[in-house]
């Protein structure tokens, strides 16, 4: 088992991938999840638009103040962190009933918004993977977010970027994370991704929930990585095992 503090460390220390600049028109379903601290609003996670009033993100993003509607909002349609776009307040937050603070499985959450997005070429809902979809190793996927785009920098980039990753062998991922000093259980509800033969770039705490696409279909979203270096894959929550629950919760 791991504590919540270790959860945050794992997300902050994710294995790295090479990133390329992106425009919001390339990923119109991606949003910034923001939390208010006094008069300041900071991006704390990333989400994906499901409907004009629902956003999918990681359940660990909905812990503490982020779960309090009056200090949470979503910014859509913006390529740059914290600027422009449509801003909509959060009405309520839902975590998957099987998620707990002491493990990474079922790391799925949905934000219900106070009002509605206006769809455009910069703001659109995503198509999600159907139930039963399973990815073998070496399938190309794309992750998007506002993560760090250089190996040795501290701060995340302000501008949206994307990276091409490949799914890894699931059993190998299970073994690698199981061998950590504090073992982490990789389940069938997760997708492991990496770029073979590269060290890449970091993804930070703010990029929890970053969408993973296959052929413009949302197949996962960033859950965690390892603080022990780039030999560990990034791990995403798979959408397919939770598609029925997601559709149900995003229908009202």
Image: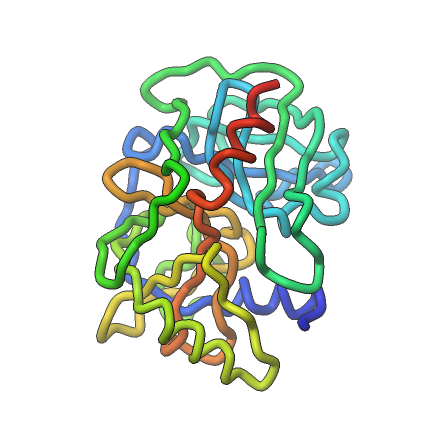
* Residue at image location 51% in from the left, 56% down from the top: 223
**Frontmost residue, 116 versus 95:** 95
Query: Residue 216 at what x, y percent from top left?
Result: 28, 36
Q: Residue at x 42, y 59 (%)?
A: 148
Q: Position of 176 compared to 193: left or right?
A: right
User: Left or right: where does residue 125 sit relative to residue 182?
Assistant: left
The correct choice, above or below, for 120 with respect to 10 in the image is: above
Q: How many marks?
A: 0
- Image location of residue 59, percent across then percent down: 62, 47
Identify which residue is drawn at 54% across, 62% down.
11
**In this picture, residue 240 sits left or right of residue 46:** left
Q: Nearer the viewer, residue 246 or 120?
A: 246
Residue 9 in the image: above or below residue 175 = above
Q: How is the image coloured?
A: rainbow
Which image quadrant for residue 127? top left
Q: Quadrant of the N terminus?
A: bottom right
x, y percent for residue 67: 73, 40
Question: Residue drawn 56% across and 15% down?
Answer: 116
- The answer to whether residue 128 of the structure is visible from this angle is yes
Vertical side of 191 occupied by 154: above or below: below
Q: Is residue 160 visible?
A: no
Q: Quadrant of residue 80?
A: top left
Closest to the observer, 168 or 146: 168
Residue 190, how many percent across, how many down?
Answer: 45, 57
Where is the C terminus found, in terms of image quarters? top right
């Amino acid at each position: 088992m791991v504590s919540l503090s270790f959860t945050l460390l794992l997300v902050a220390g994710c294995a790295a991938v090479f990133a390329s600049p992106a425009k919001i028109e390339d990923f119109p379903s991606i949003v910034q999840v923001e939390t208010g601290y006094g008069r300041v609003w900071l991006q704390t996670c990333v989400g994906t638009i499901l409907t004009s009033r629902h956003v999918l993100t990681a359940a660990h993003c909905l812990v503490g103040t982020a779960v309090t509607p009056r200090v949470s909002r979503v910014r859509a349609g913006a390529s740059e962190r914290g600027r422009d776009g449509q801003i909509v307040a959060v009405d309520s937050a839902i975590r998957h009933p099987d998620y707990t603070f002491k493990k990474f499985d079922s790391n799925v959450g949905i934000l219900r918004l106070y009002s509605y997005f206006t769809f455009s070429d910069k703001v659109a809902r995503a198509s999600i993977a159907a139930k039963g979809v399973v990815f073998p190793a070496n399938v190309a996927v794309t992750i998007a977010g506002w993560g760090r785009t250089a190996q040795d920098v501290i701060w995340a980039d302000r501008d949206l970027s994307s990276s091409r990753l490949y799914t890894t062998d699931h059993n190998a991922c299970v073994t690698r994370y199981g061998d950590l000093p504090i073992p982490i259980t990789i389940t069938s509800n997760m997708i492991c991704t990496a770029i073979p033969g590269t060290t890449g770039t970091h993804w930070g705490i703010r990029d929890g929930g970053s969408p993973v696409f296959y052929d413009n279909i949302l197949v996962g979203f960033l859950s965690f990585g390892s603080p022990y270096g780039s030999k560990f894959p990034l791990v995403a929550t798979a959408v397919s095992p939770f598609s029925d629950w997601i559709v149900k919760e995003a229908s009202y």
